[in-house]
Image (spheres, rainbow, N blue to C red):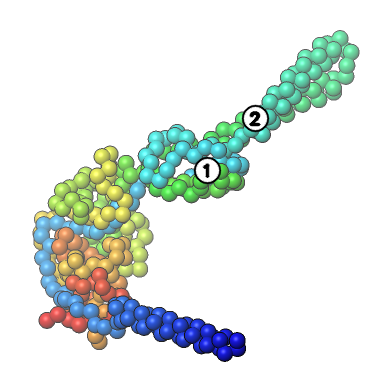
Amino acid sequence: MNRRVIIIGVVVVGLISLTVLKLMSNKDKAAAKIYIHDANAAVLVETTTMEKHTFESGFSYLGTFEPYRQNTIGSDASGKIIRLSIEEGDRVSQGTVIAKIDDEMLQLQLENAEVSIEGQRNDDNRYSNLAKDNAVAGVQVEKTKLGLRSAEIQKKQLQKQLRSTTIKAPFSGVITKKLVDLGSVIGPGTPLVEITDISSLKLTVSVPERDILKFKLNQAVSVKADIYGDRSFDGKVTNISVVADKSHNFKVQITLKNSEQELMAGMYGSVRLSNSSSKSRLAIPRKALIGSSKNPQVYVVRDGKAILIDFNAGISDGDYIEVISGISKTDQIVVKGQVNLEDKSNVKINK
């Protein structure tokens, strides 16, 4: 009997060992098929250096379109949301009901306040008549009138709280964020949704000190969006900063109508001013630009590595961007292959 048990144990152990060896073999084969990116491998890129570029008959300044209005809508009331009428992406008009908070207890309190007012009014009439016959003290009449006024104020407070249980859109726009769900219990100040209004857009550009006097408030300007090529949109200068940043650039804000909503917030745009003479400036191809035009960056190759650096940009004509500072004439600037780069990546320049 013991011999039989030993034989069975040996067989079981052997089967387990074979299974483990098979699984390990499969794991090794699968691992061999998986591609593991070599973080130290050099990325092939194309580069260029700054060069003189002639900006013809005008100046162009880069920026990013921003919504005319964008606000997070909160609640003034507390309670459970019993109706939620919107989803992300919905277009809403001013006054559209966004959410409804449970108001049953407030309704009951309002009914109680109305009953109290009715009783106070009856007492006021009764004591006023008695006071005419000197049958009651004047102080009692005064207390009754004050009680009536207090009850009426309480009713107005409850009515305001009831109105607060219905949250409406303060302006027309698109629901870009929904921050609560049906059944959520919220308190005063709880954010419910974010509404974005792009019926008009704002384009903010950085203008060098030498060019700031070219802009005037309410000045009509021509605005272009990268996505629409050479197509122009009418804009108006609505704000000029009175304080320059550390790079001696001034923020200029241009507002333009977007009633057809062809443009969207976040798109790149530029404003162009006509000029009678051309200017030759040090510039780089615009395709080298990384990030937003508010914080322009490029990759430069130094000691075999791609270094992400900030630079101070000036005018642009769509194909080239003027470099005011931040890049030297000898820097090799990456113009192709940036999508595969990170700061301090190893690179190889394609000759």
Where residue 189 appears, x then y in whole percent? Answer: 56, 47
Q: Nearer the viewer, residue 202 or 276?
A: 202
Residue at 18%, 72% in the rendered image: 336
Residue at 23%, 67% in the rendered image: 289
Where residue 66 appears, x then y in whole percent? Answer: 33, 51
Q: Which quarter of the figure is the N terminus placed in?
A: bottom right
Q: Which residue is mark 1?
A: 182
- Could you tell me the amino acid type at mark 1? Leu
Mark 1: give few (<14), some (14-19) or many (20+) Cα within 10 Å. Answer: some
Q: Is residue 10 above or below residue 328?
A: below
In what element is the residue under mark 2? helix
Residue at 21%, 73% in the rendered image: 337
User: Residue 117 falls in which quadrant of the image?
Assistant: top right
In what element is the residue under mark 1? loop
Q: Nearer the viewer, residue 333 or 108?
A: 108
Q: In the drawing, what numbered circle is on residue 107? A: 2
CA separation, marks 1 and 2?
A: 21 Å
Where residue 266 appears, x then y in whole percent? Answer: 31, 54
Q: In the drawing, what numbered circle is on residue 253? A: none
